[in-house]
Image (cartoon, rainbow, N blue to C red):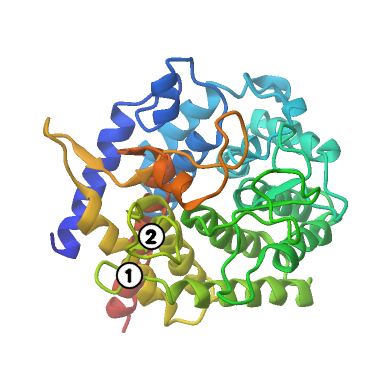
Amino acid sequence: MTHAEILDTLGKYVDYLIEGSTAAAPLWNIEMVRSGKPNKWNYIDGCMITACLSLYKTTGDEKFLTFSRHFLDYFVKSGGVIETYRADEYNLDNINQGKNLFTLYDLTGKQRYRDAIETIRSQLETHPRTKEGNFWHKKIYPWQVWLDGLYMAQPFYMEYETRFNGMKGCLDSYRQFMNVKKLMRDPETGLYYHGYDESRQMYWANPETGCSPNFWLRAMGWFLVAMVDVLERMDEQLYYEYRSIMAMLKDAAEAMVRFQDPDTGMFWQVIDKPGIPGNYLETSGTALFAYAMLKGVRLGYLPKRFAAYGKKAFYGTCDKYLGVSADGKLQLSGICLVAGLGGASHRDGSLEYYFSEPVVENDAKGVGPLLLAYTEVLAAKKEAGKMVSEP
């Protein structure tokens, strides 16, 4: 497909997904579909609604706003009630959807969204932390920090503190990033390990460093986007901290581009092990990289040259994995369904583990980031068109 055909196909694809989805039964939440259980408040839907709201902002098409409102209103009731959400689970994943409440509150002025923001913020007030000060990834994973969790919680935390709390917690958020840099960055590659166990008790943790053994692509993708999204929500009055996160983003982006597949523009499921048996070019992490690069350049956090890497990743993913299924429906494939550390299934962070998780189609952990990258491509085209038309 040409680039124009890819963009046209993505427009049809997102229409297919939202026309076939409701909050009770979204097409893109494959974990929920496979479980057979009713849908609940979760980060996977959060990724997709973030993409829909971004599409609304970029295109102005009301269908994206209407769908997003109906979806969140299924859960968000008056008085700060969010059905199926429980703060005492202490799960950072459940913070992610909270970002969309700010957007809907700004667009509609509805008090229910403002009250729900307070409900989510209350979780962070008592959320357990490591001794170094980072939020535990989940209550069920004590003393552990995962890269995923920075994406899930920190943009919401930074936005709340900047807008509604006199910036009181902004330095706390910043320090959590600096701890991750100190504890989870590999000095040799510049990449970040998926997880860190402060207690060093987990079977996957290196007894000296506390880190998990490998560089999982989607975790690194979440982390890149976390930095971009936090910078977007950060007040530049925090001059030193703002520039420190920007420098960390650029360093991580430089580390990533060294591992970008030259043929496809994509990245491997375990980043630094290209081509070894079992490894594969993976959609969700590549799409997160594309989005982080394109948005980072647009907002001035990254040098302009990184846009080329982002576009190569975006179009390369579409070339390889966006297509038509056997029954004639549009689909996005090559998406790792889930990967974590610990738990009942002995997820040990080994290469064999990361290669063993199911690869699926149409899951929002891949679709959402690709659509967010798509909105960045559309925004860049719109801006270029505006510049051409101006005298």
Whether residue 7 is visible here, answered yes or no, is no
Distance in Å between CA atoms under marks 1 and 2: 8 Å
- Image spot of residue 116 (x, y percent): 69, 31
Quadrant in which the C terminus appears: bottom left
- What x and y, as percent, mark residue 74? 52, 21
Amino acid type at mark 2: Trp
Residue 384, which numbered label? none
**Circles 1 and 2: CB distance less than 8 Å?**
yes
Q: Quadrant of residue 244?
A: bottom right
Q: Report the front residue among 141 and 296.
A: 141
Marked residue nearer the N-terminal end (1 or 2): 1
Going 68% across and 70% down the picture, which residue do you hit? 245
Question: Height in image: 354 above or below 184?
Answer: above
Q: Nearer the viewer, residue 77 or 365?
A: 365
Judged from the image, the secondary structure of the residue bearing numbered disc 1 is loop
Residue 143, picture quadrant: top right
Q: Which residue is mark 1?
A: 261
What's the mark number on residue 268?
2
Residue 288, x across and y down, in percent? 45, 57
Q: Nearer the viewer, residue 257 or 39?
A: 257
Residue 302 is left or right of residue 230, and the answer is left
The relative height of residue 71 versus residue 301 in the rendered view (above or below) is above
Residue type beneath disc 1: Asp
Q: For mark 2, does the 10 Å Cα neighbourhood hold few (<14), some (14 to 19), or many (20 or more) residues?
A: many
Dot 1: within a 10 Å radius of its alpha carbon, few (fewer than 14), some, or many (20 or more) residues?
some
Which quadrant is home to the N terminus? bottom left
Give the residue displayed 83% in from the left and 57% down from the top: 172
- SS of the residue under disc 2: strand
> Residue 10, percent across and down?
25, 49
